Amino acid sequence: MIDAITSTAAPRIFSGVQPTGNLHLGNYLGAIKQWVALQHDYESIFCIVDLHAITVLQNPDALRKATLEMAAAYIAAGIDPEKCIIFPQSMVKEHTELAWMLGCSTPLGWLNRMTQFKDKAGKHKDQASLGLYGYPVLMAADILLYHATHVPVGEDQKQHLELTRDIAGAMNRQVNAELFTIPEPLIMGEATRVMSLRDGTSKMSKSDPSDMSRINLSDDDDTIRRKFQKAKTDMEPGITLAENRPESANLLRIYASLADISSKQAEAQFEGSEFSHFKKELAELTISQLAPMRDEMQRLLKDKAQLKAILKRGSEAASDIAATTIKDVKHALGFVRV
Ligand code: TYM
């Protein structure tokens, strides 16, 4: 039996974003905006998952830059670094350590079901790296290391969260103890899956070759106006949430999420309006929320020493928790400590 179990009774959230390219409106509405609201009710740990980023080749200078930008974006969006732990994943070595241990108890069959791997590896599965394949195991390690009770993410991460729960359950049964807390996904808000502005059936994503498909948090006001104005819509009359009108439904959900109203309310608000009017309103609402964040991010990025100090403090706090968990796991698995 395990003699020191560190599972926490306090509700604790853990989440992260990959420091690859620009943050977009999907990342903001699906994840970061939700974290900002949750930080008051949960002990909060927000990671910049640079080890996940290198599952595809990164330019080292670009990765360093994106990591600091991500820290600035978290804070500019309203995450309070005095209250929450913010840190880069690679600064806490226990993430990779636990990932190996979990990987040894994760059947290949479970990983083969992961749709994200299938999407990312595409037809060239044999050329995909072991890291890309094991990506969800590292994500499970991130979460289980901190005994997170809840994980706020967008809809696309749901399958990874289910795998995390399966891995935690399997490990607990293997060692016959409550070694890991089983985390609950928190998929919140009206925009849990923001779709591309060019195609309402595919997800808004950093990797879409068309910049017109997404609103970046760094876009200037005119670019935001232009992107919404050019956003694809159909020729049908009416702005609706109807399933067969994916572009219209997507824009309504974005509006609702920004305005903190339900999508039904947004639909009622624009009943009978022209798309051109709705798109203008949507652009101005987006600008009113993103512009102050963009400016604050630029201000924070002027003082890199201060940002690095926040990340250092966060890494130390995270390491304290992670080290205790790893000690328990090593003991449970039978490693000798001398
Ligand atoms: P990443 O970097 O792809 O995305 C970060 C967060 O943004 C959400 N998201 C979206 N939400 C709504 N609509 C969209 N179009 C959209 N695109 C992205 C994602 O769901 C996510 O919440 N594997 C994760 C990072 C990660 C992680 C973790 C998350 C690593 N370890 C532990 C939670 C807990 C990822 O690649 O996110």
Image (cartoon, grey):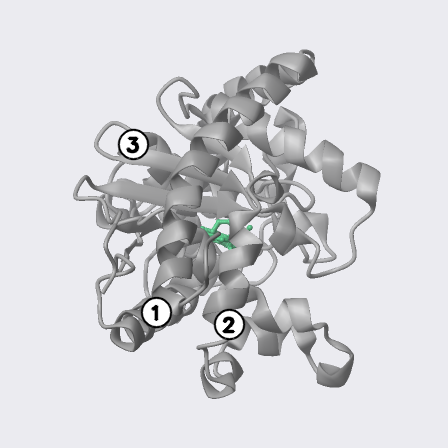
**Would you say the residues marked 1 and 2 are in contact, meaning their CB atoms lie under 8 Å apart?**
no
From this viewpoint, which residue is outermost toward the bottom? 109
Q: Which residue is mark 3?
A: 37
Q: Is residue 92 above or below residue 312?
A: below
Q: Residue 84: x percent and y percent?
A: 38, 27
* Residue 234 at least partly seen: no
Residue occupying the point 24% across, 49% down: 7
Residue at 50 percent across and 79 percent down: it is: 111
Residue 205, disc: none
In the picture shown, does residue 304 fall above or below 118? Answer: above
Q: Is residue 34 left or right of residue 212?
A: left
Determine the residue located farthest toward the front in the rendered image: 338
Which label's residue is closer to the chain start, 2 or 3? 3
**What residue type is disc 2 on?**
Gly
Percent x, y for residue 74?
A: 50, 30
Q: CA distance from mark 1 to mark 2?
A: 15 Å
CB under 8 Å between discs 2 and 3? no
Q: Position of residue 154 (x, y in %)?
A: 41, 54
**What quarter of the picture does the N terminus occupy?**
bottom left
Tag 2 secondary structure: helix
Which image quarter: residue 166? bottom left
Cα separation, mark 1 vs mark 3, equals 24 Å
Is 109 left or right of 192, judged from the image as shown?
right
Please state the horizontal and vertical placement of residue 152, each as a whole percent of the image.
Answer: 34, 48
Mark 1 or 2: in front is: 2
Residue at image mark 1: 162
